[in-house]
Structures are given as C-alpha cells and as structure tokens.
Image (cartoon, rainbow, N blue to C red):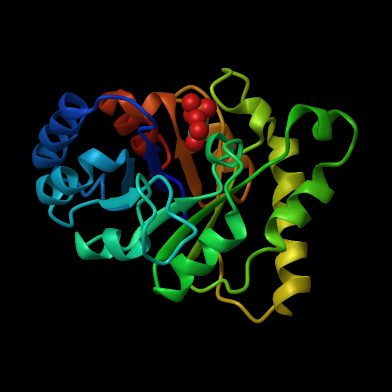
Amino acid sequence: MTSRVCKVWGNLKMHPVSEVLSAYQALIAADKDGMFDHFGLVVPYPYLQQASELFNGSIGIAAQSISEHESGAFSSQVSGEILQDIGLQTVMIGHSEVRQLGVNVGAQLKVAQKLGMHVIYCIGEGVEAYESGRKEQVITEQLSVLESLDRVTIAYEPIWSIGTGNAASVSDINEALLMVRACLDRSFSGNFPETPVLYGGSINHNNCLEVFTQTEVNGFLVGGVSLKPKQILEVIRLCS
Ligand code: PGA
C-alpha cells in the first residue's frame, strides 16, 4: 500500500485501438475495487467519441493535441471547441512527438486554458541537453509558456526515455521534480494549488513501484504499456 494517490494516464499514441478500448472496458466493468478511479486514456482523435461513450465518465479521456487556432478554416486540425462539443474537457499538450512537428505549444496552451480545459502539459529534455547539463534550462523554457496553473497537470518525460525501455533513474526524476517545483514557485510565487507532476518514459510493471515510492511523482503517463490493459492494471495495483 502506498499512501498517496497514483494517477495513471495511458497514451495510446497512433495505434488502432478498438480492441484495446474494449479490453479496458471489460476490465473496468469487472473491477470492484475502484482500481481505475484515478486512470485515464489519451486517445487518438477518431476514437474519442467512442471512448467517451464506452467509459461514460468512469475514467478520464483526453485528446492527444489541440489546434493552436481557436476556430476557423484550418482543415485537418481539431480545435478545443470541437473537443468540448463532443464532451471532452482534457487535452495533452507538448508531447515531444507533437513538439517535433513544430507546433506552437504556447498558443495551444492559451486556447485550451481560455476554454477552461484540463491540460496534461508534457515537458522534458532531449539526450543532447541531458548529456550537456542543460536539463534545467530546457525544463525552465518549456514551463515559461504556461500562463496559469489552473487545471494543469505536468508530465515530465525526458525524450531519451520515451519508448526506449530506458526509464530515467530515481535520482534523475527527483532532480527534475525539484527543478519543476522551483520553476513553478518562481513563476507563480508559490501561489498555486498543488500542481500534480507525473513521470513518463518507459514505465512498466517492473519499474513503476520503485519510481513511485522513491520519488514524489503524482503518477505516470504511460505509452507502450497502455496498449496492454492487464499490464496497466498491474501498474495501478502496485502503486495503489
Ligand atoms: P513510453 O511512452 O511509456 O512508451 O515510453 C511514454 C509517452 O510517450 O508518453
């Protein structure tokens, strides 16, 4: 038993997930212990409506990105208004796989926050910054575009750990958490509710407990393993 709540978000990335969603639904329907009370899925756009209907509020559902534009003639993009129109209130912003497309993360945050949406804001340094000791600089720059901490969850995801099987060490994560807290404290003068900070990057049922008990993370953003609902349940079980 751990004493604090472990929030787990599964990022389903760009995978066809009809069967995965059904498997989650079966596990959640069979669950009598509230194991999924602090669980959510970050779902590819075409499945958002299906997921909302399937889970009907029993877990969190988030979109994987949002247009930096509020509305208008922007074919292929999905605005915050569209997400809210289908009943969604949560969006992940700043995932490194989205940042590499050259999106304007600051503008995306602005539109989401203007609409009052919950944001999972991903930050994290690449391998070059990590190796050259510029981790704090990158984290500080990425956090500097946040204008408000209302309804914000931070996800610290060093890029070199995502999808590599090489999770960051407990000391790397603790160091990043201190940097994040110090930066938020400077920017928001300590005048913010306890902003949750998650860790993401190669989390699985073998390493989650060590990270959760030896750091102060509030939970995890899980990629690859989220395609395996039974393994996610194991992660949740170990950390609850
Ligand atoms: P991973 O992905 O768990 O497969 O490393 C994490 C993420 O991209 O959020």
Q: Viewer-proximal residue, 104 or 222?
A: 104
Quadrant for the C terminus, please. Answer: top left
Q: Which residue lies at the image location 56% right of the left edge and 69% below the top edge?
A: 194
Q: Quadrant of residue 41?
A: top left
Q: Position of residue 156 (x, y in %)?
A: 61, 45
Q: Is residue 217 left or right of residue 183?
A: left
**Residue 226 shown left or right of residue 33 in the figure:** right
Q: Quadrant of residue 223?
A: top left
* As drawn, 210 above or below 122: above
Residue farthest toward the top in the current orientation of the protein: 165
Q: Quadrant of residue 212?
A: top right
**Figure quadrant of the N terminus:** top left
At a point 32% along the width and 47% down the height, the residue shown is 39
Q: Is residue 203 visible?
A: no
Seen from the viewer's position, the closer of residues 239 and 75 is 75
Number of labelled discs? 0
